[in-house]
Amino acid sequence: MNTLVKLANELLQGQPFEYAVCGGMAIDMFLGYESRRHGDIDILAFYPDRDKIIKYMQSIGYEVYEMLGGGKCHHITDTENQVVAKNNIFCTKGNCELVHLYPTSEKDVYFMDFDHSGLTSLNFIEFLFDEKSDTEFLYRRNHNIRLALDKAILVVDGIPFLAPEVCLLYKSTDVQREGYQQDYEKATEKMSEEQRLWLNTSLIAMYPDGHKWIV
């Protein structure tokens, strides 16, 4: 198990919000080994818990920023003053080597530049917000695509993570990105027939004109 994943879980467990490791590290948790190098830690959370997460991360010494698009982010100093333009926030602490911020003419708004060389300490965490019903995970880009929560959020060694078929559906929008094709090949080899069928059906729904991962 990746050390930073363990540390992130220790940081978040017991708090009054749900979370799960997602992205490439979730794929590795499913595989049971570290298949490739990852640039950062992505954590899935749900929209109703956004303010709770922001306040908690601030309370333990992190600075919190929300993505704005166009290479900009907004420093959230007060949960009452948010733009909520995108689905993700990132939290930094101390001398974070992953992100460099440059001031703009707008108050608390920065240009940002990410260094994807890899995270070496838990001074950067990104949260990506999704939605759910009482029983189902709702795919953010199409709420008609759903999966039972107990199948969407899996657990290994007490650490929750997003199921590989859901991770791959999100990754399907950028298959040329480094590592994504490898994630697909390794994960689908181990996934159950039920998981592969859900992914394939979801890909067909999202890409009626075709996609390289549709089988």
Image (tube, rainbow, N blue to C red):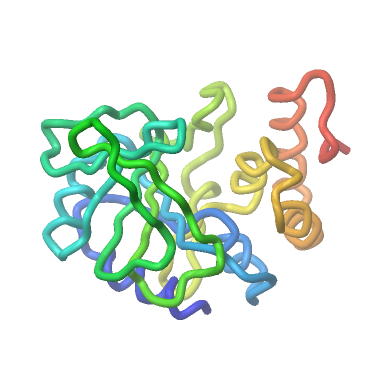
Residue in view at x 37 percent, y 42 percent: 111
Task: Locate residue 2, reporting x and y percent.
Answer: 51, 77
Quadrant of the rendered image containing residue 29: bottom right
Position of residue 128 relative to residue 157, above or below, is above
Q: How many marks?
A: 0
Residue at x-position 58% and y-position 66%: 38
Residue, x 49% and y 30% (percent of image)?
A: 140
Indicate left or right for 113 with 62 as reference. right
Q: Residue at x 47, y 44 (%)?
A: 149
Q: Is residue 115 left or right of residue 107?
A: right
Tell me residue 36's x, y (percent): 67, 70
Residue 67 percent coordinates (x, y): 37, 38
Which residue reaches farthest front? 105
| Quarter of image, res 116 | bottom right
* Residue 21: % across, % down: 46, 59
Q: Name the one closer to the observer, 189 or 213.
A: 213
Against 86, is 33 above or below? below
